[in-house]
Amino acid sequence: MKNYQTARGTQDILPKDTRKWNQVEDVIKQICHVYGYDEIRTPIFEDTSVFKRENDSSDMVNKEMYSFSMNQKDSLTLRPEGTAGVVRSFVQNKNYANADLPYKVFYKGEMFRYERPQKGRYRQFNQFGVENIGVKSPYIDAECIALGYSVVKSMGLNCVKVLINTLGDAQSRIDYREVLVEYFKEHLDGLCGDCQRRFVQNPLRLLDCKVDKESEIMKNAPSLQDSLSVESKQYFDQVLQALDNLQIPYEIDDRLVRGLDYYTDTVFEVVSTHSETGSQSAVFAGGRYDGLVEYFGGPQMSGVGFAMGLERLLLLAQAEGIQLDEDDSFDVYVMGLGEVNDVPFNLATMCRSAGYKTEFNPTTRSLKAQFKTVDRKNCKAVIIVGESELANNQVNIKFIETQKQICVDIDKIVEVLDAQFEEKEHGHEHGEKCECGSCNKEND
Ligand code: HAM
């Protein structure tokens, strides 16, 4: 029989892990909220031309896209990243005409790249990203890095460092291209096949080569810093100054060019420095892009953003020993003993309607077996429906922490649970007046 498995480079996110994902997503939402970024949800697939722009030389566009066609005419592509879709949407919805630019959005969701899978690198993975479009300012570049940095720090990660560089304005890159061509044409034979292609298409991409990265030819290549225009240099200095003001430490890495073609001026990558991190160390990365809005038919407007790999973030949290919320406890467990018909089922419904996370198992098992489940599921209170109590319209409730067990009328159950859980939350004894203000009532 066929052994069904997830497709290569994809994985199930199991219930035991979704709690961690929710926690990460809560942190993201909270931080985006304070920075004033609203959520956007763009389609998971787009017209291929949204991602594949003319002369694009990146590996992502040329080798890694999942493209398909349903009618031999239109080519569609599963999104390999979020930026292109967001900018397409920005232009399609004429957000550039808003009086209140910049347009600030965040997104999270699945991305697809046909890469060689390994730890931290998948074919389907999740990114959280932000885009800030319409105003070009070094403060916004710094704000963007600060937002991502704040997410990483709020998750408790310590071993991260910010690498930053500038690709300069258009003129700087034209000048640099000439210098690079001059240099690399003497060394072409010593470069890998991909680099030979990159040399023709976009010599800047040579600096991003993973194969030749450590070679002497690469190490001795001229630096972009020497081709920067005065304006680009000034802009970059201002970004660094803003990061200093925010007390975000960084390292300038003049070989950082990033793997996508649309970047201009500032580019950055935040990497893990933890010893257990494999080669996939970039937690989040991004930069400024000056030409994308125009490409999609909008006015000349600049944008900046980053994307964070959420699987990587969770792997790094694990490597650093950070305990994420694993609270899988139940408030109430309802068990039936003997001939009690549908009473346990009805009581479970009643508790759920009152907001209590309630477990109910309709199988008839021994008291001992059911209490083992109570233990495993970490239930705080157990409602035991027994035949003799039921004859008086009553059931027993046992509170696990105190081991206190009381017999109560069925129609008083929610009241008793409310009193007990409120007591525990606010730390006062039954009958004492609570000082908290929010539960300002006398308990009896
Ligand atoms: P990127 O560097 O291609 O940039 O991806 C950003 C992050 O996504 C990486 O740093 C990594 O954490 C995660 N990532 C990328 N590929 C994979 C993979 N195969 N498996 C797991 N995680 C992965 C972008 O995507 C740009 N759109 C960022 C951006 C936004 N630039 C401007 N705005």
Image (cartoon, rainbow, N blue to C red):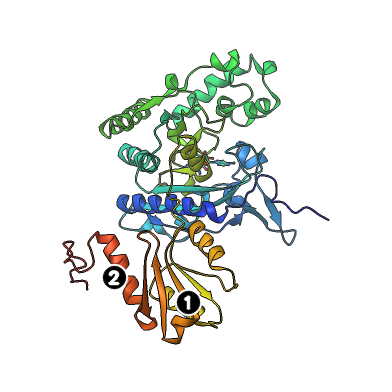
Residue shown at 61% from the left, 40% from the top: 60
Q: Is residue 44 left or right of residue 436?
A: right
Residue labelled with disc 1: 385
Q: Residues within 10 Å of mark 2 (few under 14, many from 20)?
A: some
**Residue type marked 1:** Val
Q: Nearer the viewer, mark 2 or mark 1?
A: 1
Q: Nearer the viewer, residue 393 or 308?
A: 393
Q: x, y (%) of residue 266?
A: 41, 34
Q: Which residue, as the protein is rendered here, is positioned at the far right?
A: 1
Could you tell me how far apart the alpha carbons at marks 2 and 1 are, in whole angstroms?
Answer: 20 Å
Q: Is residue 208 left or right of residue 406?
A: right
Q: Is mark 1 within 8 Å of ligand 1?
A: no
Q: Quadrant of residue 415?
A: bottom left
**Residue type marked 2:** Ala
Which quadrant does the N terminus fall into?
bottom right
Which quadrant does the C terminus fall into?
bottom left
Q: Which numbered marker is on residue 150?
A: none
Residue 87 to residue 415: above or below: above
Q: x, y (%) of residue 125?
A: 57, 47
Q: Nearer the viewer, residue 262 or 212?
A: 212
Residue 55 appears in view: no
Q: Nearer the viewer, residue 371 or 94?
A: 371
Q: Is residue 235 left or right of residue 90?
A: left
Residue labelled with disc 2: 419
Residue 435 appears in view: yes
Residue shown at 34% from the left, 49% from the top: 31
